Image (spheres, grey):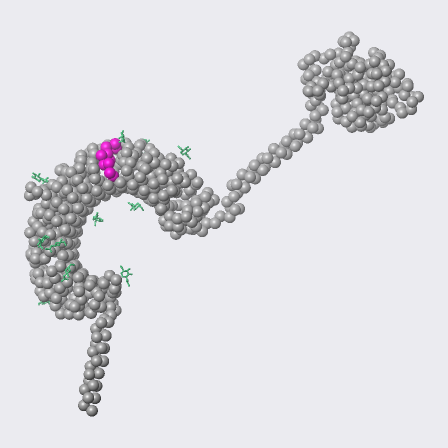
Amino acid sequence: MTSMKIIIPVYLFGVISLTLLHTASSIECPQFCTCNKTTSEAKCQNRLYDGIPAFPNYITSLTFTGMNLPEVKKKTFNLIKDLELQVLILRHNRIGNITADALSELKHLRHLDLSGNSEMKIDQLAACLGNIKSPNITILKLNSFGWENEQIIIYEAISKYNITELQMSRNYFKSLNMSALEQYVPNLTSLNVAYNDIEHIIPGQLRKLEIWRIHHNYVDVNYTLFNSTGTCNFPSLKVLNLTSNFVNHFENRFSCLDKLEVLVLDRNPVKQILKETFSDLPSLQVLHLNHLGDRLYNIEAFPFRSKTLKELSFSRNHFAFLKSARYLYFDSTQIFSKIPNLEAIDLSENYFNLTDGVLKEMISNLTNLKRITIKSCKFQTIPTDIFSKMKRLEVLNLTKNHIGSWNGTEVFGSISSLRTLRLDFNYINVFNDTSFPESFMANLKSIDLAGNPFFCSCKNLWFRKWIHSWRLKRPHIFKGYPANYLCINPPELYNTELKDYFPSDDECYPEKMNAALQSFIVLSLVGIFSVILVSLIYKGRWHIRYWIYLQRVKQRGYISLNSGDSFLYSGFVVYSDEDRHWVFSKFLKIVEEENDQTLCIHHRDFEVGKLIVDNIADCIAQSRKIILVLSRTMMTSDWCLFETRLAHRKFLNDDNGSLIIIMLENIQKKDMPHSLRNLVDLTTYITWSEEPDLQERFWTNVLKSIKGD
Ligand SMILES: *[C@@H]1O[C@H](CO)[C@@H](O)[C@H](O)[C@H]1NC(C)=O
Ligand SMILES: *[C@@H]1O[C@H](CO)[C@@H](O)[C@H](O)[C@H]1NC(C)=O
Ligand SMILES: *[C@@H]1O[C@H](CO)[C@@H](O)[C@H](O)[C@H]1NC(C)=O
Ligand SMILES: *[C@@H]1O[C@H](CO)[C@@H](O)[C@H](O)[C@H]1NC(C)=O
Ligand SMILES: *[C@@H]1O[C@H](CO)[C@@H](O)[C@H](O)[C@H]1NC(C)=O
Ligand SMILES: *[C@@H]1O[C@H](CO)[C@@H](O)[C@H](O)[C@H]1NC(C)=O
Ligand SMILES: *[C@@H]1O[C@H](CO)[C@@H](O)[C@H](O)[C@H]1NC(C)=O
Ligand SMILES: *[C@@H]1O[C@H](CO)[C@@H](O)[C@H](O)[C@H]1NC(C)=O
Ligand SMILES: *[C@@H]1O[C@H](CO)[C@@H](O)[C@H](O)[C@H]1NC(C)=O
Ligand SMILES: *[C@@H]1O[C@H](CO)[C@@H](O)[C@H](O)[C@H]1NC(C)=O
Ligand SMILES: *[C@@H]1O[C@H](CO)[C@@H](O)[C@H](O)[C@H]1NC(C)=O
Ligand SMILES: *[C@@H]1O[C@H](CO)[C@@H](O)[C@H](O)[C@H]1NC(C)=O
């Protein structure tokens, strides 16, 4: 029985302890926070919550901002003191009172940020900071405390730690005591005193300082800042950000900054950049001189001379790089010379005139350039002859110019190294097949043409097809496509995505169709005209021949039939092809063979290769008589009628005797053509008969007529 009494409590204890263990190991992330197991971070923001809750034990970084923690004590961290908390960010938590031992239990703290608790009392803060028990504390951020002066008491408090990064930006310091920092936090590698009112710097040496952010103050620098002790004050400085200060001249060159790689002098009221200002910075790689206001008027020779400089930014200075610029001094051929290793240049928002050649003189010798940015310079075209010589050019950024078109062959024809091209927000309406040569596309990874005022017209049909074909090969090549490739024209398609503009064949091919139609019409007209002409010529061919005949006759002089007996032929026989048989078998046989007369027969006597009218003219001229063999077919033959007409003419010129008419058939005069009827009226004709008796008389009459006068 007693054993039972013992067993039950042991059992109960087991259950209870298991439950406790379970709850302890499964602390959930507080509802108003986010916890990330991979980064071990917890973030809690903007809740009206007093105190710090418990967190899962993997958390090593806690960001607790915008909360209400008026009093911070050791107890405040009770629930998290067992975490291995390395990063504690307590920004803007309205901390008023903080006890000296508040942070003493956070043994692993590396990074403490108390920024934005401007109600905190400085001596309380100093006492608290002096009691951090973590040996690893190196980063301290005390931004936005509203302090009017530097708090040396704080420096003293932290002097026992190995602080390497200190931030005190967004206060109201008027001066900065580098000497005190040298004394108390000599191991600083990063100092941020940006957004103060610092005008005066008490020199001091920070031999390990690498990054110094002192932007947005009123600092004017001279070499005593860097060399006040006879040795260099910041021998390790790599990055000096002096954006938005009062630096207005660099009378002495920057020096004593042998490790300086990045120098940012943006937004300083610089008036002059003197000769070789930066040439004593043997490690300088990046130089920013942007947004200098409009005071800059003089840039001396070789201002950026440097063997190491890789990136130069001279943008938003509204400097007039113009041949015609007055009261401004710069030398276009010297300004960027002696920077042999320059890889990137930014000349955005200055004034250029692409036709005066200054830009070309300035940058065309920088043949190692890889990245060029010239934004917002109102370029109307892409300058030729500048980029084509830069064989290593990878990025060309011409955003926000007024570029409408360019000569693709001249600008991009010999560039094949380009990877990124930005032509977004220009004035490009239409692209055509010459805009981007094939070779230029070789290495292109990204092209941005967004924000251009595209025309949704058939002129861009090529462009759409081009985009499509390149997107098949390189899906992400067009930046901003399709959402930012919008049409402005025609008005009914305003703000339509270019992608959605599918012109139909009817819409788009009218040009081609028109061309086809036009050529069709032209061809048809030519055709119709030719047909008409040919048929007119055909119809009037006899008139034409007649006319030609007259011309010939005129030329050679008319040979009269009566000019002696020197005729070659007794007669010229005009007959229809149909009657050829009769002519050859009967007429020639009787007249030529049996009666020794020579006749001119066009089937036989016309000279080959001679114009037919010439043949006729010759025949008529060389014949004493003209013999018309009349038949019905002869009257329908234009050819014969033509010959008849020539005969008629001769008849009129000479006398009736030179014409002999033979009627092969009995033809009514009313069936004859007018001209023929006239002839028949004026001449007696001999009629052929199939009857042998009558035939004898026929031949007698014929021969008499041929031989007679
Ligand atoms: C945790 O952080 C990692 C790295 O920043 C991130 O990829 C992941 O999405 C985060 N997880 C959650 C749940 O937020
Ligand atoms: C800070 O402590 C003092 C006295 O210890 C007290 O008078 C004051 O109200 C406290 N301030 C806040 C914000 O709690
Ligand atoms: C301090 O940092 C070192 C190196 O990161 C680490 O090994 C050591 O555990 C840390 N000490 C504490 C108390 O966290
Ligand atoms: C101080 O911190 C720097 C950088 O973290 C480190 O190199 C150096 O060894 C540290 N010195 C001491 C004494 O902890
Ligand atoms: C600064 O660093 C040096 C060398 O790393 C070290 O000897 C020295 O103790 C450090 N100073 C402080 C205050 O931690
Ligand atoms: C250099 O600047 C310091 C303060 O920053 C000033 O006291 C000193 O007169 C200046 N020296 C010259 C030569 O301008
Ligand atoms: C620092 O200045 C002193 C005198 O002002 C000069 O002798 C010395 O050469 C300078 N050091 C460097 C590295 O410029
Ligand atoms: C310098 O400071 C300005 C202002 O905060 C910042 O925009 C810029 O990025 C900084 N430049 C460098 C190189 O750190
Ligand atoms: C640009 O330069 C050309 C040639 O020097 C000149 O004719 C033209 O007027 C200039 N244009 C402007 C806007 O200055
Ligand atoms: C470019 O360099 C060549 C050869 O070094 C030189 O002759 C020419 O004058 C230079 N052009 C400019 C504009 O500096
Ligand atoms: C120009 O375009 C390049 C490539 O997109 C980009 O990296 C760069 O920041 C741009 N330059 C400016 C001044 O916007
Ligand atoms: C572009 O330049 C090439 C080479 O100079 C020239 O042959 C071509 O006619 C130009 N094209 C246009 C449209 O001006």
Outermost residue toward the right in this view: 693
Foreground: 686 or 5?
5
358 up-or-down from 145: above or below:
above
Residue at 38% x, 37% y is: 413
Q: Residue furthest bottom?
A: 1
- Left or right, residue 572 beside residue 400: right
Q: Nearer the viewer, residue 48 or 481?
A: 481
Relative to 489, 631 lies left or right: right
Q: Quadrant of residue 552?
A: top right
**What stretch of residues is rendered in magenta?**
332-342
Q: For this rendering, which residue is in front, 426 or 275?
A: 275
Q: Horizontal and vertical percent for residue 444?
A: 36, 44
In the displayed structure, 81 sits above or below 368; it is below
Measured from the top left, where is residue 148 in percent x and y?
11, 54
> In the rendered structure, does residue 705 fall within the stretch colored magenta?
no
Where is residue 454? Give x, y as percent. Answer: 41, 45
How many badges with numbers are in the image?
0
Question: In which quadrant is the N terminus drawn?
Answer: bottom left
Taking 443 as reference, is 245 left or right? Answer: left
Q: Main secondary structure of the magenta part?
A: loop
Residue drawn at 17 percent across, 64 percent down: 85
Q: Quick check: is 337 in the magenta stretch?
A: yes
Res. 48 visible in picture: no
Q: Judge left or right: residue 342 versus residue 518.
A: left
Residue at figure coordinates x 23%, y 32% from the top left: 334
Whether residue 503 is situated above or below residue 519 in the rendered picture: below
Location of the C terminus (image quadrant): top right
Name the spot of residue 340 as percent of width and height, x first: 24, 36
Residue drawn at point x = 38 percent, y = 42 percent: 442
Residue 459 can be seen in this image: yes
